[in-house]
Image (cartoon, coloured by chain):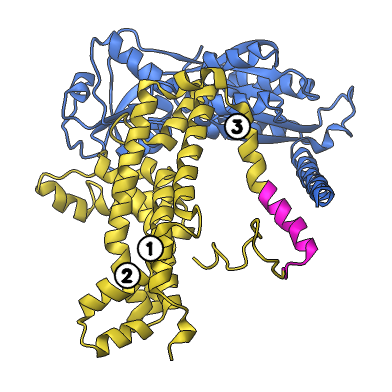
Chain colours: A yellow, B blue
């Protein structure tokens, strides 16, 4: 979080002057980097047919896709929170053989193409695979269901939350946890009262990243879940399909997806003074105060 | 400060321009490099021919390109395969194509409408759909009607892509209503869902079923009037390789080219 909301952020009106240690030429490269991301966004916005925008995004298939995307991304983010917190805790706090290898494997979905992830899921939870067969005998068919979409999204999004939270856990350190323990708090109490409040910003940013990643998931969903309106065809799949016949609708939907993602990210990173942050900051004085 | 920002953005724009120009240069290098050096009225054909062809033509057009290069040693054929609608978009946006072979007339019409087809497109092949099931046929499908039964995991293409439109048309002709569990974005995905055993059945082109071999089992659709997809081919307007393009199209439509296509399962137009 410190990286995203540095102490010496740009000077606001009325704030005292602060020393800036950034060489001027850095701004040039930073500008090129920013333009590289921003120009294509502007290019796409310029393509949006604003007169027809509302009709384009309010077709039955578009609304079904948006609704499905929001529902599945929320579900997969919850899954990521439920399993990501314990994973991050184990990776950051525990020490065991093969920990490095485990971390590398958990983070693999970050670097593996999503299509590969989809294939891996297919050959594990698919109807022909043994786990899938076991589920089938209980009457649970995962392939071609919304469950498959959520699984595909959680698979690619989980590392984002784990990575973000593990970093926060390491930065927060264990001093307060140790103090709480010496005062008689049980491990679960320490986790609930000390550790989680301390790393809440990291958890929130990790969850937001996971949500955004889930929202944009395409390859794994396509490979593992299929594509059916209202069941498995999420917004990115709908965009890809619309592109075949109606490029204007594809552009309008792309803009919608960007807007939704932007709102989500802005809500989480809006300002370092959000009540949530102040609360967390307030409960966590700078570390050098304590021995 | 204002000026500095302006200066910076100008510099950044210049940097971007340089980079994009450089990439343009390399792109045209690979695709039409010898175009400038190719003598226009040489008796022997030479140069690089860029062929944009529908994904379903990958195997056949790769073979035909090899044959074309063998017949004209100074010619290099560069091939680009993708969905027909993707290719049309690329060509109308300025991608350097000399020949375009589409998997349906609809996308060829898009090129003609954009005034980028040099002359009348020629139909050179046809394709029809077929029903495929996994080798063990888990849902015991013996006919098109079986595949349309509710509860059957049938996978087809989405109506927006040619193979999906053909599937719906075939179903209508057979008096069936399909209840697919998935409408995939392209025919390769349908094939994948069947070969992996996830789906009970799928509708793909005969030319997709054939190379899949024993990975799938074919169930004849037995339609009185199957929906036939026409494959048109044309030289791209504005291409500097008109002579080469016409020679390649001649090969595709000649008996030699037709044999390669029919061996792969395509029909004659």
Residue contact between numbered discs 2 and 1, judged by CB atoms under 8 Å: yes
- Judged from the image, the secondary structure of the residue bearing numbered disc 2 is helix
Label 3 SS: helix
Highlighted range, magenta: A20-35
B194 vs A141, left or right, is right
Q: The disc numbered 3 marks a residue on which chain?
A: A
Give the mark nearer the N terminus: 3 vs 1: 3
Taking the image as shown, residue A12 lies to the left or right of residue A256, namely right
Q: Is residue A34 magenta?
A: yes
Distance of label 2 from label 1 (alpha carbons)? 8 Å
Residue A143 makes an appearance in the image? no
Q: Dot 1 surroundings within 10 Å: few (below 14), some, or many (20 or more)? A: many
Mark identifier at residue A196: 2
Q: On what subunit does the disc labeled 1 rest?
A: A
- B54 vs B212, left or right, is right
**Which label number is shown at residue A45?**
3
Q: Residues within 10 Å of mark 3 (few under 14, many from 20)?
A: some
User: Is A65 or A200 nearer to us in this picture?
Assistant: A200
């Amino acid at each position: 979080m410190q990286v995203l909301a540095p102490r010496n952020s740009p000077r606001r009106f009325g704030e005292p002057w602060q020393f800036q240690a950034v060489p001027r030429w850095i701004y040039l490269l930073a500008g090129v980097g920013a333009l590289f991301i921003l120009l294509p966004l502007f290019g796409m916005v310029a393509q949006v047919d604003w007169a027809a925008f509302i009709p384009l995004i309010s077709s039955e298939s578009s609304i079904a896709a948006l609704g499905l995307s929001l529902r599945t991304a929320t579900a997969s983010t919850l899954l990521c929170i439920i399993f990501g917190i314990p994973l991050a805790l184990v990776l950051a706090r525990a020490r065991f053989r093969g920990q490095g290898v485990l971390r590398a494997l958990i983070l693999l979905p970050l670097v593996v193409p999503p299509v590969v992830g989809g294939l891996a899921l297919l050959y594990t939870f698919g109807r022909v695979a043994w786990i899938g067969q076991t589920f089938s005998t209980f009457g649970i068919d995962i392939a071609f269901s919304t469950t498959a979409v959520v699984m595909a999204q959680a698979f690619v999004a989980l590392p984002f939350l784990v990575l973000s939270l593990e970093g926060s856990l390491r930065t927060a350190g264990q001093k307060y946890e140790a103090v709480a323990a010496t005062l008689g708090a049980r491990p679960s109490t320490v986790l609930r009262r000390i550790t989680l409040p301390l790393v809440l910003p990291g958890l929130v940013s990790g969850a937001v990243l996971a949500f955004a990643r889930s929202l944009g998931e395409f390859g794994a969903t396509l490979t593992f879940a299929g594509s059916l309106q209202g069941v498995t065809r999420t917004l990115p799949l709908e965009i890809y399909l619309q592109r075949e016949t109606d490029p204007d609708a594809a552009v309008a939907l792309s803009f919608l997806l960007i807007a939704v993602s932007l709102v989500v990210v802005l809500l989480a990173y809006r300002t370092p003074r959000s009540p949530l942050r102040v609360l967390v900051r307030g409960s966590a004085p700078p570390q050098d105060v304590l021995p | 400060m204002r000026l500095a920002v302006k200066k910076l953005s100008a510099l950044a724009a210049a940097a971007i321009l340089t980079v994009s120009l450089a990439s343009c240069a390399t792109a045209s290098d690979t695709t039409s490099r010898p175009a400038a050096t190719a003598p226009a009225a040489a008796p022997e054909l030479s140069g690089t021919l860029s062929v944009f062809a529908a994904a379903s033509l990958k195997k056949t057009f790769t073979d035909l390109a090899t044959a074309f290069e063998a017949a004209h040693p100074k010619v290099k054929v560069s091939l680009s395969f993708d969905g027909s609608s993707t290719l049309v978009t690329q060509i109308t946006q300025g991608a350097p194509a000399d020949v375009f072979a589409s998997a349906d007339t609809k996308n060829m019409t898009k090129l003609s409408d954009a005034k980028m087809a040099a002359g009348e497109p020629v139909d050179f092949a046809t394709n029809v759909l077929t029903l495929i099931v996994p080798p063990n046929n888990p849902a015991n499908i013996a006919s098109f009607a079986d595949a349309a039964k509710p509860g059957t995991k049938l996978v087809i293409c989405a109506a927006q892509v040619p193979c999906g439109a053909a599937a719906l048309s075939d179903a209508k002709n057979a008096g069936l209503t399909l209840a697919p569990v998935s409408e995939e974005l392209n025919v390769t995905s349908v094939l994948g869902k069947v070969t992996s055993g996830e789906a009970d059945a799928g509708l793909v082109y005969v030319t997709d079923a054939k190379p899949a071999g024993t990975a799938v089992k074919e169930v004849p659709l037995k339609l009185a009037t199957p929906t036939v997809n026409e494959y048109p081919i044309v030289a791209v307007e504005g291409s500097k390789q008109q002579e080469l393009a016409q020679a390649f199209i001649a090969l595709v439509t000649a008996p030699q080219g037709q044999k390669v296509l029919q061996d792969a399962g395509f029909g004659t137009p």
